[in-house]
Amino acid sequence: MSPKSNYLNFLKLNKKKLNTSEVKVVVTFYKFFEVRDTLALQGTLKSIFNNGEIKGTILIAKEGINGTIAGKTSDITLALEKIWCLDFLTDLEPKYSFSYKNPFFRMKIRLKKEIVTIGLPEICPNKIVGNYVKPENWNDLISDKNLLLIDTRNSYEVSIGSFENALNPNIKNFREFPDWVTKNLINKYPEIKNKKIAMFCTGGIRCEKSSSYLKSLGFEKVYHLEGGILKYLENIPKNESKWNGSCFVFDYRVSVDHNLELGHYEMCFACRMPISQNDKMHKDFVQGESCHHCFKSSNDKQKKRFKERQKQIELSRKKNQSHIGQVKT
């Protein structure tokens, strides 16, 4: 099925939900490919999104493109048509969900050294990568008792949901993944490179780059979830799922559940950890200032700054404006 056909199928399946101007289509995409002129691509994308109706963030690097955007169905449809007309993006396969308000406040198209930062510029999924596993085949793969299943996301993402029996590296950011592999896999288990390993992340980009990294080290049997958790939650019925909990997303929805429905988490704006309604009842929770995760780790000066930022956010909301402290990209 073509990328456009997949998109039209998403619209058809969610026709009732999208039949209102309040509901926005959220589009997540990435592609590793050689970008010869990053400035030219930035200019092209700026011309596609120049009407200001679509919000989100797109990152461009020599290794490819990575982005999440959101807007009304009509605007998203027009933008995707233009993107698919670009020679190097005709096969771009986005992932789709929806939100009852736009989870972003502005459109940013930025040039970066990497579209997902592992800190090793020599790692190139365009040249070497592990085996892609479609969501429909993922359950069978991870049912193998001899398989090592690794969650390549950050610890705060893993804290609200993951696959059954997945190993949590407890990393704070993706840059820490190579060191974790060295210390906890290679140095501890000399035969680890012969073991069957599968990895996953939110949308597929981190686990794809991770698989490229492991292949470069000589790991033989490396697999990763094509389209990531989001595609899995979209395609696999809840009664067949091996996913437990919610999936963290990097926008104001904070998390999504099966069928990409809005999850039940909010975000602490001090430490960016996901928090539940029960967490908000904790004695250390102060809106915009602290939660039980960060109350003891932040000093009075930081708490004062967080409190002032919360005031500015509330003022911006009343004026229907964005605030720099609202979105983490």
Image (cartoon, rainbow, N blue to C red):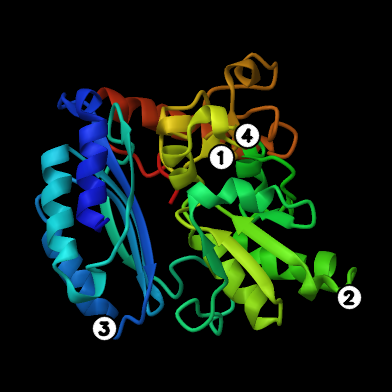
| Residue 52 visible in the picture | no
Residue of label 4? 160
In front of the other: 244 or 327: 244
Q: Against 155, is 179 above or below?
A: below
Rendering coords of residue 76 (x, y %): 17, 46
Residue of label 3? 37
Q: Which of the two marks, 1 or 4, is nearer to us in this view? A: 4
Residue found at x 53% / y 38%: 247
The secondary element bearing badge 3 is classed as loop
Q: Which of the two marks, 3 or 2, is nearer to us in this view? A: 2
Residue found at x 71% / y 76%: 219
Q: Gap between marks 3 and 2, in whole Å?
A: 42 Å
Crowding at mark 3 (Cα within 10 Å: few <14, some 14-19, many 20+): few
Crowding at mark 2 (Cα within 10 Å: few <14, some 14-19, many 20+): few
Check the picture and name the quadrant holding the N terminus.
bottom left
Rendering coords of residue 244 (x, y %): 63, 33
Question: Do residues under tags 1 and 4 come within 8 Å of each other at their CB atoms?
Answer: no
Can you tell which mark lies on residue 272? 1
Residue type of the residue flagged with mark 1: Arg
Q: Is residue 188 left or right of residue 248?
A: right
Residue found at x 32% / y 54%: 94
Question: Do residues under tags 3 and 4 come within 8 Å of each other at their CB atoms?
Answer: no
Residue type of the residue flagged with mark 3: Asp
Q: Against 16, is 8 above or below?
A: below
Residue type of the residue flagged with mark 4: Ile
Q: Earlier in the sequence, mark 2 or mark 4?
A: 4
Q: Is residue 185 left or right of residue 316?
A: right
| Residue 249 visible in the picture | yes
Q: Which of the two marks, 2 or 1, is nearer to us in this view? A: 2
